[in-house]
Image (spheres, rainbow, N blue to C red):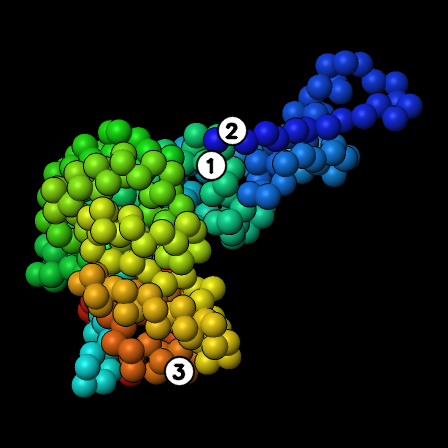
Amino acid sequence: PLTLRIGISQSEGRTIDGRTLLNEAELALARTAESDSAKYHFFSPDIAAQARDRQRLARDLERAIQRRELFPVLQPKWALQAEGGVRLAGAEALVRWRDSERGLVRPDQFIPVAESTGLIEPIGEFMLRSACRAMRDWSDRFGWSPGIAVNLTAQQFADAALPQQLRNALDEAGVATGLLEVEITESAAMKDVVRSAATLQALRDLGVRVAIDDFGTGYSSLSYLRRFAVDAIKIDKSFVDDIGSDRNADAICDAILRLGQSLGTKVIAEGVETETQMAFLRQRRCDEIQGYLLGKPVPLGEFEQIYLTRPLDPQ
């Protein structure tokens, strides 16, 4: 199906040339792309100001990539043990950017800019290789390494060269393929089900583990889980947040857990921040959890110090 989107600019008595009017309409059109529901948008001066800020952010981000100012942080993932307590099950790698003027820039601010400007490719490559190097380094020095999950954007997942890129990064670092996990969002996987199924199978053939992120927030089609070769599904934080306070959230989390168990697929709950949430998930035999309750994202060196040189069981 075709989707129609319209950007609108009006002269409204202004002395304005046709080119400027068209540029304003294009800016308004770009705004509609940021929403799943908006079909048209009118130009306003704040759109132009935001566009200038976005361009400046893109320039600064490109410079930050060149200067290697971006850095990875790791958030631990914990396996819920049947007898109680938890065990370190791995970590999720997240990118961070500390700008000299802005300070720490939130990922939800610079990742969309990176995606729209093509800068996401070097960022994704950096994160993948950083994770692989860390796992190799820890394996050499400690005799073992937790597995690390790396997020893939929709653009990365759509790249036909993705399986080879992963293979190259693993080979160059000398890392066992089973240690690497990639996460893709449900909506990205559903854009082209046939292609996605083939790509996921290619990744699994490499030995790379695959997780579907933000499960339940996208198309929520159960049929694709039968077709997709995945190792885990992740319950979105928006559902976990309301455990214990919203019966609908409880029901959705319970249903996802039962679905994963029926399919033999591991279920991971993200954004766990309270004891109530963890108790609910443990009672329903959730496999793994991550969230601020048991560990915030920390730089690689701090992660090593806390979880590898003197492993802690936080419960």
Classify residue 144 by image quadrant. Answer: bottom left
Circles 3, 1 touching at the beta carbon (< 8 Å) = no
For marks 3 and 1 on the same chain, the one whose residue lies earlier in the sequence: 1
Q: Position of residue 271 (x, y in %)?
A: 41, 67
Crowd rating for badge 1 (residues with CA inside 10 Å; few <14, some 14–19, many 20+): some
The answer, for residue 273, to whether it is visible in the render is: no
Which residue is at a point 61% across and 30% down the rendered structure image?
5
Say which amino acid is labelled 3. Answer: Glu
Q: Position of residue 275 (x, y in %)?
A: 39, 82
Q: Position of residue 180 (x, y in %)?
A: 19, 50
Which mark is in front, 2 or 1?
Answer: 2
Say which amino acid is labelled 2. Answer: Leu
Say which amino acid is labelled 1. Answer: Ala
- In this picture, residue 40 sits left or right of residue 313: right
Which residue is at a point 40% across and 58% down the rendered structure image?
216
For marks 2 and 1 on the same chain, the one whose residue lies earlier in the sequence: 2
- In this picture, residue 91 sits left or right of residue 26: left
Q: Residue furthest left?
A: 143
- In this picture, residue 237 sits left or right of residue 310: right
For marks 3 and 2 on the same chain, the one whose residue lies earlier in the sequence: 2
Which residue is at a point 12% across and 42% down the rendered structure image?
206
Q: Which residue is mark 3?
A: 275
Q: Which residue is mark 1?
A: 114
Which residue is at a point 66% across and 29% down the rendered structure image?
6
Which mark is in front, 3 or 2?
Answer: 2
Mark 3 residue element:
helix
Classify residue 44 by image quadrant. Answer: top right
Crowd rating for badge 2 (residues with CA inside 10 Å; few <14, some 14–19, many 20+): few
Q: Can you say whether 62 is above or below 112 in the image?
A: above
Q: Which residue is mark 2?
A: 2
Crowd rating for badge 3 (residues with CA inside 10 Å; few <14, some 14–19, many 20+): few
